[in-house]
Each structure stands twice: as structure tokens, then as C-alpha cells.
Image (tube, coloured by chain):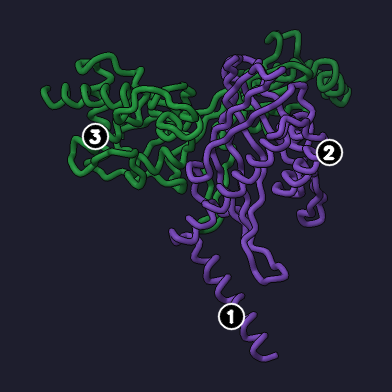
Chain colours: A purple, B green
Amino acid sequence: MKRFAARWAGMILLALMSFSALAQTSEEDMLRRRAAEKCAQFNNYVSLIGKKTGKNGKAIPVETRMFYREAALKLFIANGNSYTEYVGSEERTIAGVMMQTTSVNRPNQKPKSTLMKTYLLNLANLRYSDVVITSTDVSNIKVSSLRKIDEDTYVCTCYFNQTFIGYRDGIPVYKDRTSKYVKCYVYLESTEDGLEYIIRLGDVYATDTERL
Amino acid sequence: MKNIRWGFILLALTLSCPLGQAQVIPGGELDGIFYKSRVALVDEFMDLFNFTELRAGEDTSSLDGKRLHLLNLFNKERFQSAKDTAFLQALSFVDRVLEDSVHLTIADSSWLSRAHCVGKYEGRDVPVYLTLKIQEWEPELYSWIISKAEGEVLTLAPPVYSRRFSIDPVEHDIRFMALSRITSSDRKAILNYAPAGWRPDETSVFFSLVHEGALTLEYVETLEFEFGQVPGYVFTIRYFDREESTNSGWLIDEWKEVDL
């Protein structure tokens, strides 16, 4: 029991020392890389959600795409849903994660803001015979510095590009390239395995350039 | 003059034909030279400015190497030739940065953001210009704050300034009954009832209108950042979304000398 308590105390002390020294390069670099990996995970799901045809040429059921949608939403704060927090005695509702898209081809047009839940649902239901989405490799995702916003909470921004090609009967009919900025939250949380850094994705700002 | 010409030639070479890769390769827009050289994040701009990040193949061991590195952070469309006043001024600016070892940090109070926003007021789109600055709440804990707001809708300008809108000199005898009317049916002309020449503080009006739910901000149309850390200069960066170019992202688009 003593050894167990000592191990827990040691882990807590180590985590606190690590977090208080977040400004040190190696710790911050590790967390920034993890944020990039979380974005890469999201990008992987996005390509799976859009994909309509498997390698064998068979149609991928919508239920499969919805499964990946649910998995993708779990990467976001509150699973992409709105949530309530208390600031003193005041109740405050935080809207679900949003995606705002502006078009480079139509700069005077109002940006389109959509709940991430809705964006992914729309992606799964696009009327193309197939959709191919490719993204910047995780090693090339750009990540800003981590900035403290609260006790044990930090934020950073990840940037990457994504290309989208929509096919009808094997012929590409639409293509665009999107630049995406994703806000990432880094929390220190108490889990079953002790204190851990948790990464969650937040709002996304995107600019798209239509090609076809 | 010879050095300046050489610097411009090198700059032009660097910006138009980067690092020997003259054609776009498949997937290049995701991971290639144009993606990597885009200054996508403001943090990235600061790291490049501070020399804590270098572009692939750059050699900043010499003074000219350092100059070129900083010149690559400018919007090259501002330069026409080696004799161009803008280019010569940029060189002076760059030399000042190097002489004073200027270092940009988020914590500096001498940088700010200007956001041209589109707001919604009484069902119509209205422009609102916000100036935001970084405030440090405690060590290493920062947030943006709105330090200034400007816009026609915030001036509360009446449709007309006229003596017809006035509180009669005997109104006090009937306990200023007119106040009810001027704050309801005459509310748009309320500034007529202020002291001559008095104008409201637009920032205070902004906070009041938002607090009352009368004004919302829909989106940011354009964004720029202004820096005052270089002694004797103020410079502005703007975002340039250029495809197939190594001169894209957050770039210095304006720089001017100021009195110290």
C-alpha cells in the first residue's frame, strides 16, 4: 500500500513538474506533435467518411461512414456537441464546435459557418459516386506555440492543406484545395492511469480554392 | 549600390524559382515547397522574423544571408526594382532589425490586430472595425482584448442635426415630460440633445450595443497585424493566399518610419 501511494505521489509530482515546465522545449514539442497527430487522425476519418467506393469497387454502406463520423466527433471537445459550464453562479452555454469556410474564388461572399456535426453529416451524404480526400502528411502539419488559457489548459493552432475530388461514374467533376486551421486544446486530466495530457480539437477555419 | 543590386537579384531569384524546384509535383500542394514556404501562422512569421526558424536551404551565417532571410518575409509585389524606394526602405528597415536584434514575442504590448468585421444591426450588415491587443493576466497567461471599436453605426449619428430637436427652456415646469418622447419616438436623433459638439466614444457604444443584443458580429472580413517593436518603424503584415508561390501567407505589406 505504501509503495502504491509512493508511486502515485511520484507520478503526480512528475506530472506537475512536467506541466509547470511546459515552457521547456522538449515537453512543448511533444505536445505540439501530439496535436498534429490528432489532426492527422481527424483527416483520416474525413477521408473515410467521404469515401463511397471500396478498393474492390463495392459501395461502402452509409452506416460505415456514420461509424467513422461518430469516431471523428469524439476527437472534438464535448464530442462536437454544445455544453453548459458554470462561471460563478452564471450558467454559460458553449456552442458545438464550428467550421467556418471562406472561398478564395468568391472573396466577397459571406463565409459559411456550420456545426462540425453537420459538416461531417453532409460529407457522408454527398451525391458523388466517389470522393477522394487527401491531406498534408502529419510530419508536415504546422503547429503554433502552446498558449496557456487556464490552469492546466493550453491551446495551439494546427495548419494543413486538404484536396477534395468528387467523382461521377469514375470522372472527376469537382476538385478543390482547402487550407485548414484547427484550434487544439491540451488539458491535464486525472485518468485511470494517472495524470495525462488530453488533446481535443476545437473550431476549424477553412479557406477553399475551387479548381474544377 | 552594388550590394543592393546583388541583394535584389538574389531576392528575386529566391522568390521566383525556389531552391531549384521549378515545377509543381503531384501532392505538392499538400506537402511541397509552396505549402512549406507559406507563412501560414502568425507564430510562424514571428519565428522566421526572430531567426528561430529558417527555410530549407537558407544560409544566414553572413549579413547578406540574414538580410535575404528577412526580405523574404516581405510581399514581393511591393518591390519594382533595385532602385525602387520601397525596396531601399525595406533594406533600411531590415538593417535596423538586425542592428537592434529585434525580437518579436506575443507578450509585447506594441503589437496589435485590426479586424474589419461585418456586423448585424437592425437586420442589416454594418462594418465594424476592431483593434485588439494582447493582455497578460498573469505570467504566461494571455488573451486578446478589444481595445478600440470604430464604425458608422457606433457614432450614433442622427439623420439630421436640427434645432427642431430640443428640450424647451420651460420644460422643467412640466417636470421634463419631453424626455419620454425623445427617448422613444425621437431616439434616433438623441445626439441632438447632447452638448454642442459632443460625440460618444465609439468603443463604449460598441460594448453597450453588444450588451443589449442590438449588435452582433457575423465574421471577420479582413485581418492585419501591426508591430511597433522595431525602433523608428511601424510595420503591418497581411495574409496573401497565393497558389504556386513561395511568397504567400503572412507577409510584411506596409512599413513606415515613425518619430521615436
- Residue A148 visible in the shown view: yes
Please, is residue A96 above or below residue B212 in the view? Answer: below
Q: Position of residue A199 (x, y in %)?
A: 63, 54
Quarter placement of the N terminus of chain A? bottom right
Tag 1: amino acid: Gly
Chain bearing tag 1 is A
Q: Nearer the viewer, mark 2 or mark 1?
A: 2
Tag 3: amino acid: Arg
Q: Which residue is mark 1?
A: A10
Residues at circles 3 and 1 in contact by the CB criterion of under 8 Å: no
In the image, farthest residue toward the bottom: A2
Q: Which residue is mark 2?
A: A63
Point 68% across, 41% down: residue: A45
Point 56% across, 28% down: residue: B115
In the image, farthest residue toward the left: B2
Chain bearing tag 3 is B
Q: Which residue is mark 3?
A: B67
Please tell me which residue lies in front, B200 or B44: B44
Quarter placement of the C terminus of chain A? top right
Q: Are marks 2 and 1 on the same chain?
A: yes
Please, is residue A34 above or below residue A134 in the view? Answer: below
Question: CA gap, disc 2 to disc 1?
Answer: 46 Å
Q: Nearer the viewer, mark 3 or mark 1?
A: 1
- Residue B198 visible in the shown view: no
Please tell me which residue lies in front, A38 or A96: A38
Q: Position of residue B243 (x, y in %)?
A: 46, 21
